[in-house]
Image (spheres, coloured by chain):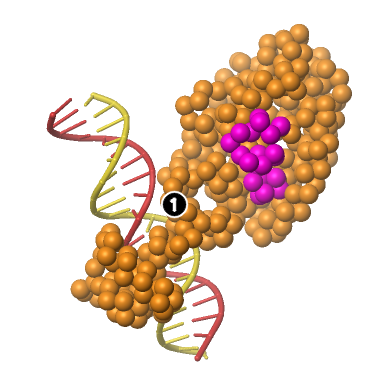
Chain colours: A orange, B red, C yellow
Amino acid sequence: MGRSPCCDKNGLKKGPWTPEEDLRLIQHIQIHGAGNWRTLPKNAGLQRCGKSCRLRWTNYLRPDIKRGRFSFEEEETIIQLHSVLGNKWSAIAARLPGRTDNEIKNYWNTHIRKRLLRMGIDPVTHSPRVDLLDLSSILNSAQLNLSSLLGLQTLMNPELLKFAATLISSSNQENPEILLQKLQENQSLNAQMQNQMTPINLQPTQNQFQNTPQQVPLPVQSQATPAQGNMGDISMVSTNLNGQMCQENLIASSASLLPSPIYSYGMTDNTTADLSESSAFQSLNDSSNQNSQNFGFESVLSTPLSDERESYCSNLMKFGIPDCLDLDDFM
DNA sequence: AAACAGTGCAACCGCTCTGAC
DNA sequence: TGTCAGAGCGGTTGCACTGTT
């Protein structure tokens, strides 16, 4: 508190580290171990302050550091953890092996944060920014269908919506650790739900998610999302054809109305392309064609491949209004 | 081809917090 | 209880790279 910084002395070097400095630091730590940073520079023959040495070691030279681009799974994990932990970069980094808090922070500020803002999502609360939504375009694009709306209403589970609302509010107020615990508790439940999801089976086959080694293309944290649990609930209540249509729309709509865990759907554009061609979704598309214009997963998922992650996220976050939703009734 | 603007990232700064002594 | 070192965080800077004009 009020302590002068360790590196305000003159004569200490700043700026980028040279390979020679890196080598000296690495060799010294290999022999003496990390720690005692105040005396380390002198002992290692470095014209650096201890803090600079510590940062250089922890953020760059540590042997377990993973360099290079963040993978899709890593980015997804960061978003989810940030929604729970906030700007606790070290806590997030602790759950991302090989990544440092500084690296994650930089990546968040330069990539994810901007992307969320472009998508109309508040990067702090992870909630859609309603003030940025273009309601008029949404209303104009919606087609009215009262009978379908009735079908949708039968799908709406009040308890489910209540739970979602609770999560949304609690995510902004509760202790992050408690929320994290809740997410973890939901993990097993969600796995069960995914297995039970019929007839619309959202569980992909191995070759549908070629980018990820897991059958379920989500990192562990991704599965532990209440939103996914909700989607599982929603997807299991429908039985009739019309219901199926509304069901997929509802899933997409629910995704867009829920906070951060919705990112956990884990679909790259590669995967979405495969999904749209899969038999399960094909049947849905066929059925929807019988009734009205195509809406649902195909419209939600089929996007250009310019930026795979952004397009995937932005599509999930689009406030798609199902054809079966009669907006006039809400006006 | 050159100038300029935008972007990404490593590194730093200043501060607070925590735990050991 | 006070001091100190280390850790952590938010914000910022400087530079290299890339895209645009």
The image shows residue A63 at horizontal and vertical percentages of: 45, 62
Q: Magenta residues: mostly which secondary structure?
A: loop
Residue drawn at x 83%, y 26% is A199
Q: Which of A59 and A142 is in front in this view?
A: A59
Could you tell me the amino acid type at mark 1? Arg
The image shows residue A194 at horizontal and vertical percentages of: 78, 38
Residue A163 visible in the picture = no
Residue A72 visible in the picture = yes
Tag 1 residue = A67
Secondary structure at badge 1 equals loop
Q: Quick check: A124 above or below A248?
A: below
Q: Quick check: A121 above or below A145?
A: below
Left or right placement of residue A68 versus residue A206 in this view: left
Q: How many labels does the image show?
A: 1
Q: Quick check: A228 above or below A53?
A: above
Q: Nearer the viewer, residue A209 or A246?
A: A209
Q: Is A219 one of the magenta-colored residues? A: yes
Q: Residues within 10 Å of mark 1 (few under 14, many from 20)?
A: few
Chain of the residue where label 1 is placed in the rendered structure? A
Quadrant of the drawing holding the C terminus of chain A: top right
Q: Quick check: A114 above or below C15?
A: above
Residue A285 occupies quadrant:
top right
Q: Nearer the viewer, residue A274 or A320?
A: A274
Left or right placement of residue A217 versus residue C6 in this view: right
Quadrant of the drawing holding the N terminus of chain A: bottom left
The image shows residue A312 at horizontal and vertical percentages of: 57, 31
Residue A283 occupies quadrant:
top right
Please state the extent of the stretch shown in magenta in the rendering.
A205-224
The image shows residue A182 at horizontal and vertical percentages of: 73, 54
